[in-house]
Image: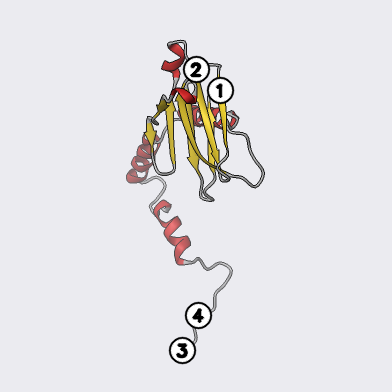
Amino acid sequence: MKPPRLYPTDVSDEEWAFAAPDLILTDPQARQRRYELQTMETTSMPLSKQIAALLLCLLGWSTVLAAPSVCPIRQDQPLRSIDAFDGEPQDLAALEPDVAKERYGHWVLGYIYDEGRFVTVRCRYADKQTHDVKLANRVEQCSYSINAKHVLQVTCR
């Protein structure tokens, strides 16, 4: 038996599965249709709240994207690890991250500046070289993340 010919107006199963829940085959003046439209309107989020949520998300991402990297970028020597210190690294006051997951984490640091101290971030590269960055100006939080390509990024704000 030959398979039926497909015409440009044929709709695939995936397209039907996507569109079928939205199809209503009742008379436009039917009572149940008015009820369905009414419930759809009352359960959706008002446009002003949607816009406010979108702006809030954009504001959060703009602060993350605007924060420069703390560790200097070195050609052919990727950043491998970081340490945060309360004061100078030789004082051996290493800070543990407040959140430490496999691919991301952060230190909350505002309390150190409240006490009149500062934070130093030690950047460790693939060639085992280190670079210390003194954060003399107040920083509330330093965050790190490791992307899918295993690139470590550090930002402080």
- Tell me: residue 120, above or below residue 123: above
Disc sitting over residue 33 in the figure: none
Judge whether residue 63 can be spotted in this image: yes
Q: What is the CA distance from the residue labelled 3 to the residue labelled 4?
A: 9 Å
Q: Residue furthest right?
A: 75
Q: What is the CA distance from the residue labelled 2 to the residue labelled 1?
A: 8 Å
Q: Residue at x 55, y 27 (%)?
A: 63
Amino acid residing under circle 4? Pro
- Tell me: residue 74, above or below residue 91: below
Q: Which is more toward the observer, 31 or 132?
A: 132
Amino acid residing under circle 2? Phe
Judging by the rendered image, the residue that carries numbered circle 2 is 118
Q: Look at the numbered disc 1 and give the secondary structure of its residue.
A: strand
- Neighbours of disc 1 within 10 Å: few (<14), some (14-19), many (20+): some
Mark 2 touching mark 1, by CB under 8 A? yes
Q: What is the CA distance from the residue labelled 3 to the residue labelled 2?
A: 80 Å
- Neighbours of disc 2 within 10 Å: few (<14), some (14-19), many (20+): many
Q: Residue furthest front?
A: 90
Amino acid residing under circle 1? Lys
Disc sitting over residue 1 in the figure: 3
Q: Residue at x 54, y 51 (%)?
A: 149
Mark 4 touching mark 1, by CB under 8 A? no
Judging by the rendered image, the residue that carries numbered circle 4 is 4
Q: If you read the primary sequence from the N terminus, does the residue marked by circle 4 or circle 1 appear first?
A: 4
Q: What is the CA distance from the residue labelled 4 to the residue labelled 1?
A: 72 Å
